[in-house]
Amino acid sequence: PTFTVGYLVGSIARQSINRKLAMALVKLAPDELKMQEIPIRDLPFYSYDHDNDYPEVARQFKQAIAAVDAVLFVTPEYNRSIPGVLKNAIDWASRPFGQNAFTRKPSAVIGTSPGSIGTAVAQQHMRSVLGYCNSPQMNAVEAYIQFTPDLIDDDGNIATESTREFLSKYLAEFRQFIERVLTVLPREA
Ligand code: FNR
């Protein structure tokens, strides 16, 4: 079977290294995974004042998450946690209460940083958030990618063969994880 995967890039920086990583994952993805970006850039700040009447951009954002089989978070670590722009996007998708778009939606997290622990702390915080949002998460393969200046170019070409192999393995494992989750836990059940 083929699955649609919506990916969120947790950085809105023009030169985002996590966007480069996302591009690389799109290129490497197996045919069974249809990768599409779910943009977060234009979302305003969330507050529950909007719960009765979401702005169009937030409506479309939630609809995009609802429409995919699984979600992949490609995120940097800011101050040892989740970047504010990404947390804000997650908050939009999780509300109004009872209409949380992540419920039973399989997910995985990956990220890159120039530092040697490669977003590990931010990813751990993501596990907590996604757990609360009732999203079944892939626990392993874990992927903490240390970014070096020429590791991935703007088009998503990876310079290092071992990194290419590792990311392919990660995506293959995610494909299997999505299939398992959707088999035992169909969303409509
Ligand atoms: C960082 N950076 C960073 N790196 C890290 O490994 N752990 C951290 O806690 C932080 N904290 C942090 C805070 C803020 C506000 C910024 C702007 C940066 C460095 C970060 O990994 C680097 O800037 C990456 O380029 C960020 O990824 P994107 O935004 O380029 O995808």
Image (spheres, rainbow, N blue to C red):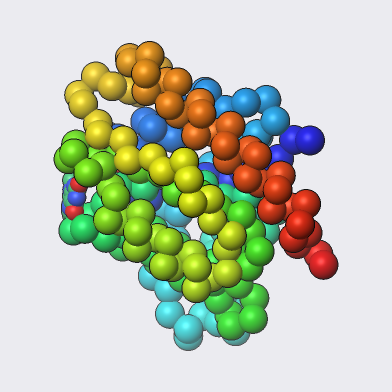
Can I make out residue 63 in this image? no
Residue 21 position in % (x across, y down): 38, 32
Coordinates of residue 75 in the picture (x, y in percent):
36, 48
Image-based side of 181 in relation to 123, left or right = right
From the viewer's perspective, tell me whether residue 136 is left or right of residue 120.
Answer: right
Q: Position of residue 26 (x, y in %)?
A: 52, 29
**Quarter of the image holding residue 179?**
top right
- The answer to whether residue 150 is above or below residue 62 is above
Q: Is residue 21 above or below residue 11?
A: above
Which residue corresponds to the image point at 47% horizontal and 41% vertical from the top-left?
141
**Residue located at (65% from left, 34% from top):** 33
Q: Residue furthest right?
A: 189
**Residue 32 visible in the snapshot:** yes
Q: Is residue 71 left or right of residue 160?
A: right
- Indicate the position of residue 77 as horizontal and vertical percent values: 26, 51
Q: Quadrant of the N terminus?
A: top right
Residue found 49% across the figure and 64% down from its top: 130
Query: Residue visible at 51% across and 80% down?
Result: 50
> What is the quadrant of the C terminus in the image?
bottom right
Is residue 177 or residue 57 the one in the foreground? Answer: 177
Q: Quadrant of residue 173?
A: top right
Q: How many marks?
A: 0
